[in-house]
Amino acid sequence: MPRWAAVALWGILTACSPTARIAGTANDIRSEAKALMVLGSTTEQPEVVARAERIDALAATIHEDLPGTADRTPAWMSTLVWVAAAVIAVAVVVFVWQSGLGQAARIAVGWLPRNKVTQAQLAADMLDPSRPEGDREYVAAMRAQDPEFDAAFRKAQAQRKPKT
């Protein structure tokens, strides 16, 4: 794996903002500067102490300037987030539909397909003794209404015919 890909992957996985990294690094610089000050004072090296104090002051300036900065999300990362959100949304819709929850929700809301309502009305009319519709009318209406049902019905009839 190329080094730049490893660095990019590390940046994505750690998800640390640039301003947070800058603040952390500035803290580390100040800690190192304080350690140099202690070392310089114990070894009686005033130049080391002076330079360490200057490094500490510069790192403190970074902390002062940091609130004026803002993190900027790269365009490719924004696109990646939107694509991931779309994939997740599609996966949720497919899961809900395939699990039967979508159908249960449609029934609960009363959002029934028109052909199913018509089929239910035909079945209710067929079962009502005061109505003249019978089994044959129901089957004829179902075949006229649903091409898949018609094809399956013709196949079932062909299988029932005696072979000569």
Image: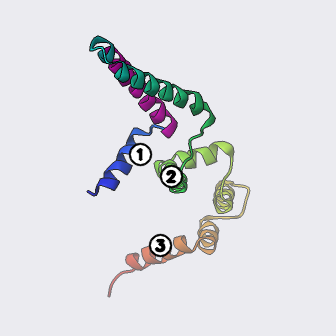
Judge whether 26 appears above or below 86 on screen: above
Residue 43 inside the magenta-drawn segment = no
Q: In terms of sequence position, does the residue under pointer 1 or pointer 3 come before the other? A: 1
Residue at far top of view: 42
Q: Secondary structure at mark 3?
A: helix
- Identify the residue position indicated by label 3 in the image: 152
Report x, y in % for residue 97: 52, 52
Residue beneath label 1, please?
Answer: 12
- Which residue is at a point 45% across and 35% down the rendered structure image? 21
**Stretch in magenta:** 18-38
Tag 2's secondary structure?
Answer: helix
Q: Residues within 10 Å of mark 2 (few under 14, many from 20)?
A: few
Q: Amino acid at mark 2?
A: Met
N-terminal of the pair, mark 2 or mark 1, is 1
Percent position of residue 20, x then y: 48, 33
Q: Which mark is residue 77?
A: 2
Question: Is residue 32 within the magenta segment?
Answer: yes
Image: 162 above or below 90: below
